[in-house]
Amino acid sequence: MSSENGQPDGDAESAPPEQLALIRESVRKARAPRAKPRTWRGAALAKELPVARVLVDKGVLHLDRYFDYAVPEDLDADAQPGVRVRVRFGAGRHRVREGRREGGGLIDGFLVERLAESDYSGPLAALAQVVSPERVLDEELLGLARAVADRYAGSLADVLQLAVPPRNARAEQRPSPAPLPPPPAPGPGSWDRYEQGPGFLASLASGGSPRAVWNALPGPEWSGELARAVAATLASGRGALAVLPDGRSVARLDAALTGLLGEGRHAVLTADAGPEKRYAQWLAVRRGSVRAVIGTRAAMFAPVRDLGLVAVWDDGDDSHSEQHAPQPHSREVLLLRAAQDGCGFLLGSRDCTVEAAQLVETGWARPLVAGRERVRAAAPLVRTVGDGDLARDEAARAARLPSLAWQAAREGLRHGPVLVQVPRRGYVPRMACARCREPARCRHCSGPLQAQGTDDLRCAWCGRGETGWHCPECGGFRLRAQVVGARRTAEELGRAFPAVPVRTSGREHVLDTVPGTPALVVSTPGAEPEAEGGYAAALLLDGWAMLSRPDLRAGEDALRRWIAAAALVRPQQAGGTVVVVAEPTLRPVQALVRWDPVGHAVRELAERGELGFPPVSRMAAVSGPGEAVAGFLSAVALPAQAEILGPVPLPVTPAGRPRRPGAPPPGEQWDRALIRVPPGNGAALTAALKSAQAARMARGGNTPVWVRVDPLDIG
């Protein structure tokens, strides 16, 4: 009988030697049972620190916390704090098998830390996958993201979506370059134009952490001066971060840094770079290969090692405010970073925001300004055209352009290009005194008044009706909303100067530079190109269109845009002239004539302090359908000092128009309420708003309610 037909009842010892050998070989080749991928059913856990604390990428407030997961032994080496992971989320307690929770959908997250045991008493689900062993989140960035989330009543997951760019596998697989040694300390250069400029650079180069608000002089030198501040920080062996409002400003600073330090010293982080290039640059910063970062608001969370300086340029530009939740402002994020890291801080601009003036007023930062003689030598001559001049000017009534502006343009075209700044369409005027142009404000909350109908005057903040209004400045009783038309400006100029080329720069097509030959350059605010050698003259038209906007920052914003355009004009000694069409007695116009944006900001800050306006007070906006807003306000536990203004109806978004964050969907009627608290109560306000919003979401509230802290446009 062969071995294949052996006795079935015999044991192994009675089997022939050939059969025993075959059995032993089969046992050797048999594989141990493998765990099912992404559930790790039956898999052994890590021997040390078997619990992973994970931040899931849900972005909703009632889930703004960490969740514990089990670490399979096969993922032990890669599952380190800071890596991207995938986990199963949403399984209930009833879905437990072999002591392990199963089910739920796969979702991305970050592994925050490893623990020996969990605070959760029930069974844990296992990590499904370690997406990449690259550690992209460290304690410093996590702490900053948490501080920003608390500051703006948002979720940590939403902030990390802004802070950590999406993964790109090809960029991650490439090694980053080796770090370069610190460069030599730069000379002061044009910083010697400022009274404390050389000392500021010397402090950075020696390892100090100075904090300054820098009022830059007119001209193109600002990019070179900011580059020297970055270079001085690098010379001390530390890192530097500079955030700018747009790609054109980033390109100018990029060129200045490259010319000063050479290639490979800094990284550029902008949304226009593309996902692969941007992630490769971000990884170079994260790995310590590059110590300096410049970019738009996307760079405000850049993980620069050993941060020595954070800088923001032109903080009054709307582009510094993030459009995605929780909508942080780059200035405030960099202020948090300066406090968290104890590094230097530089807020630079040609103008001065009220927030910048507050930093100096409180002593947190020092002013970095030039003397008045240098300011007068660098600034152009500013001339004004008021309502009285327009009334006496027949040419202005016929062509809607003052004679003084025609003369300045004609004279300037003999020597170079002339800039014409025209406000964008869509500027809505607010009510003002017909005699002195003082903005009309509510007697209860000091909000702006607006006309709902012929005789219906109401506050845009608290909604109270106003009867018997009179101007507190001059005693006038008449109101008006004046806007000088600007649609035919380019056509009028083209007909007036037929032999001169006319170039336009605006939202559809923005010019970066123009040649220094005679030409008319018609631009909207913020899109003004630089001219080779500077403009010979500039015409700032329709000043009332910007000054009459229904917004608290209308005067500040108009002055900022005027100064940005006038700073591109040649100095007065070289014949540079600026003509602004606005009432000369108004505070922003006077500040432009004197070229004193700092004084304007200081006076504006004092006035806002008396009226309880931001930034002296903290304010939040709550918007949504009327019933939802009323329910939210009744449920939120606000601080005792909080004051609710409104709710009032928001303008209906027309169909076909792009929807701004927080604005109602096209055709829907929403209400908005403003909540303000005095100084020192901002943290309590944001905590109350976040708690109420989280409770509403946990109850399954589907009606949208938008909460925004420190809104830019409050009326």
Image: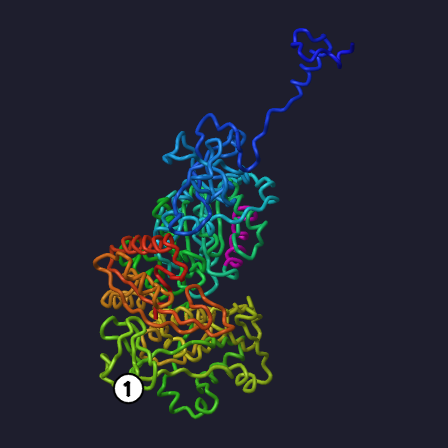
Quadrant showing the C terminus: bottom left
Quadrant showing the N terminus: top right
Q: How is the image coloured?
A: rainbow
Taking the spot 65% from the left edge, 10% from the top edge, the residue there is 12
Q: Which residue is mark 1?
A: 478
In the drawing, does residue 408 fall left or right of residue 706? right
Q: Is residue 293 magenta?
A: no
Question: Is residue 122 at all visible to an observer of this figure?
Answer: yes
Q: Nearer the viewer, residue 152 or 241?
A: 152
In the drawing, does residue 154 fall left or right of residue 441? right
Q: Give the overall secondary structure of the magenta segment.
A: helix
Taking the spot 23% from the left edge, 75% from the top edge, the residue there is 443
- Relative to 561, is 474 above or below? below
- Relative to 657, is 114 above or below? above
- Tag 1 secondary structure: loop
Locate residue 294, reporting x and y percent: 49, 52
Label 1: few (<14), some or many (≥20) within 10 Å?
A: few
- Relative to 336, is 503 above or below? below
Q: Is residue 261 magenta?
A: yes
Q: Nearer the viewer, residue 141 or 264?
A: 141
Locate residue 290, reporting x and y percent: 51, 44
Residue interval drawn in magenta: 250-266
